[in-house]
Image (cartoon, rainbow, N blue to C red):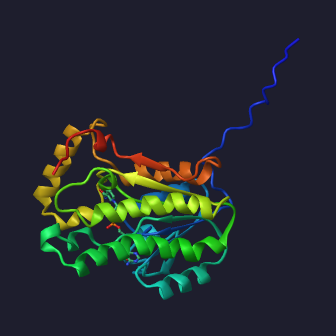
Amino acid sequence: MSTSTHQPLAAAPSLNLAGKKVVVVGGKSGIGLGIAQAAQAAGAQVVVASRRVATIQERADLGNFEQVSLDMRDEASVRQAFAGIGAFDHLVVTAAPDIGSWGGFMDADMQGARSYMEGKYLGSWACARHAAPLLRAGGSITFLSGGLAVRPKPGFAAVTPAFAAVEALSAALAIELAPTRVNTLRPGFTDTDMWGFLPAEVRAGLKEKVAAAFPARRVGRAEDIGHAALFLMTNPYVTGTVVEVSGGETLVDSVS
Ligand SMILES: NC(=O)c1ccc[n+]([C@@H]2O[C@H](COP(=O)([O-])OP(=O)(O)OC[C@H]3O[C@@H](n4cnc5c(N)ncnc54)[C@H](OP(=O)(O)O)[C@@H]3O)[C@@H](O)[C@H]2O)c1
């Protein structure tokens, strides 16, 4: 006769989001769009929020999402947007100000550094602050940082502290907002419109170098990050952590 005290295995959590409502701030492009599409494919009702609202003629690919206008730099706009959205289950914040608008440390003044920190860090803060009271039981918040949080590069001295601050906020909120789960996704190079500021041949060359150097031997795609976001939204035992989806970027020499 067995004397085992092991509990029978419960069903493993699935990536299914049927019946759930997901809000993706930054969900109209790039990584956010990849996450919005993944959430919708998993059965969720998806709201995408950012500054611009597109018509169906402009953006047929957004036709299945509810669009909300929100400027994450403006707390009143964030508060008003979430009040209009009402109760929901999972918040994902991918939006950030334009990285190309900020230069190297010695070229910057305090206003430049403040601009990125306010947009990325305090913008993420404001979204969490005004969404948290609306999250249903079992809900989660997912922020987005980037490999620069732990692997600084010359010319991005404003970005590294903003990403690191987002990761630290995520851990702090996992404690303070519990049992709401709070995590951060840390992508590596992901081929999105964010890189549109580069001339086409420079962007193509960068992608080739990334594919050659990163252990995954290819560039990242928005759907790679979408897949990881589903994991963070649906696994009930993951909180206060950073999940890196970078193709191994932070293990190898910087590519530029
Ligand atoms: N792509 C990469 O290789 C990579 C790697 C590591 C980390 N990241 C980080 O991932 C995040 C998203 O990157 P991405 O590639 O998805 O960029 P993206 O395609 O440029 O998307 C940025 C989104 O942010 C929104 N946005 C910008 N300013 C906003 C504001 N003030 N309020 C509300 N929404 C705003 C934009 O929409 P509107 O213009 O409509 O407002 C857009 O939907 C960024 O934080 C970036 O630093 C990206």
Q: Position of residue 199 (x, y in %)?
A: 12, 63
228 is higher (above) or lower (below) than 49? above
Q: Please tell me which residue is depicted at 42% across the width and 74% down the height of the picture.
A: 122
Where is residue 8, by image quadrant? Answer: top right
Q: Position of residue 142 (x, y in %)?
A: 51, 60
Q: Position of residue 59 (x, y in %)?
A: 39, 73
Q: Please tell me which residue is depicted at 13% across the width and 50% down the height of the picture.
A: 205
Q: Position of residue 36 (x, y in %)?
A: 49, 62
| Left/right of residue 242 with respect to residue 21 in the rendered view | left
| Left/right of residue 104 with respect to residue 158 in the rendered view | left
129 is higher (above) or lower (below) than 233? below
Q: Nearer the viewer, residue 94 or 205?
A: 94
Where is residue 23, by image quadrant? Answer: bottom right
The quadrant of the image that shows the N terminus is top right
Q: Nearer the viewer, residue 86 or 141?
A: 141
| Left/right of residue 11 with respect to residue 197 in the rendered view | right
